Amino acid sequence: MATYEPAKAAAAGTVTLGDMPVHRLGFGAMRITGKGIWGEPDDRDGALAVLRRAIELDANFIDTADSYGPAISEELIAEALHPYPPDLVIGTKGGLERPGPGRWEPNCRPERLKRCCDESLLRLRLDTIPLYQLHTPDPKVPFEESVGALAELREEGKIRHVGLSNVGRSHIEQAQKIVPIVSVQNRYSVTARDSEAVLERCEEEGLAFIPWFPLDAGGLKEEALAEVATAHDATPAQVAIAWLLHRSEAMLPIPGTSSIDHLEENVAATTLRLEEGDLEKLES
């Protein structure tokens, strides 16, 4: 009997985060926490198994944040995967506080970002965080001060590369005057394209673009996605991922899940090839 070999993330090709090449389909570790991205997962062993399976499927970029849980996602990553594979790149974020389930509040004061970074280093059991991202601009704190704190952390060797999240083109320009930026993480999907201008800037500057909410769960029932999925014997989620990978070589999707079956389904999207007619339906 033939052995079934699941698709691997390596089939998506590679993108570079500074000097770190990663496969162009990563894993987002937000949904391995509890309901409302709060507290422990209902199935801790299951969450650990999903993380390990992601590595087996060649997903060598894992995205997380100190606010996922809070802290829980980072702790699970370390428990499941440390000591880490040599090619694994972990990206985490700081800048959002969690007063309660489903609540997210910016706090990007420099002293707090530095404290958050130190705490992430401990939880992730790292000496240097490969990619540390400002989770969001804070309207109460000058943007340059927040980015300046990350620049200082980089100079101290606590982070290797700096990324931004939830920003516009002007933020990228401001930040690059302070510290080299290697990635931008904004909401983007086949049904939510407000960040087209930011994606274009990333392409121009050689930055990786990490779309969060890449499956845009509320929009996956659109008729075009359903039609293309049926034509390819695929799921709408797989079509959404395949479209992102086709859209730009700078794209680094990070679909997340707490299910191994869904993880394998997402990774299988790397083998889906969309045709011109499919793209016309999806982009019209």
Image (cartoon, helix red, strand yellow):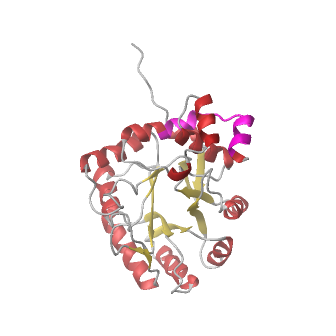
Q: Residue at x 33, y 57 (%)?
A: 33
Q: Residue at x 50, y 51 (%)?
A: 217
Give the extent of the magenta segment.
Answer: 266-282
Q: Can residue 69 be seen in the rendering of this structure?
A: yes
Comparing 65 with 101, the one in front is 101
SS assignment for the magenta stretch, majority: helix
Q: Residue at x 62, y 29 (%)?
A: 231
Q: Is residue 214 above or below residue 6?
A: below
Q: Is residue 232 above or below residue 103?
A: above
Q: Quadrant of residue 210?
A: bottom right
Q: Where residue 106 sits in the image (x, y, percent)? A: 46, 78
Taking 73 as reference, is 163 left or right? right
Q: Where residue 267 sits in the image (x, y, percent)? A: 49, 39
**Residue farthest top in this picture:** 1
Q: Residue at x 26, y 58 (%)?
A: 40
Q: Quadrant of residue 97?
A: bottom left
Taking 22 as reference, is 176 left or right? right
Q: Is residue 204 above or below residue 5?
A: below
Q: Is residue 76 above or below residue 106?
A: above
Taking 3 as reference, is 125 left or right? left
**Residue 40 colored magenta?**
no
Comparing 274 with 277, the one in front is 277
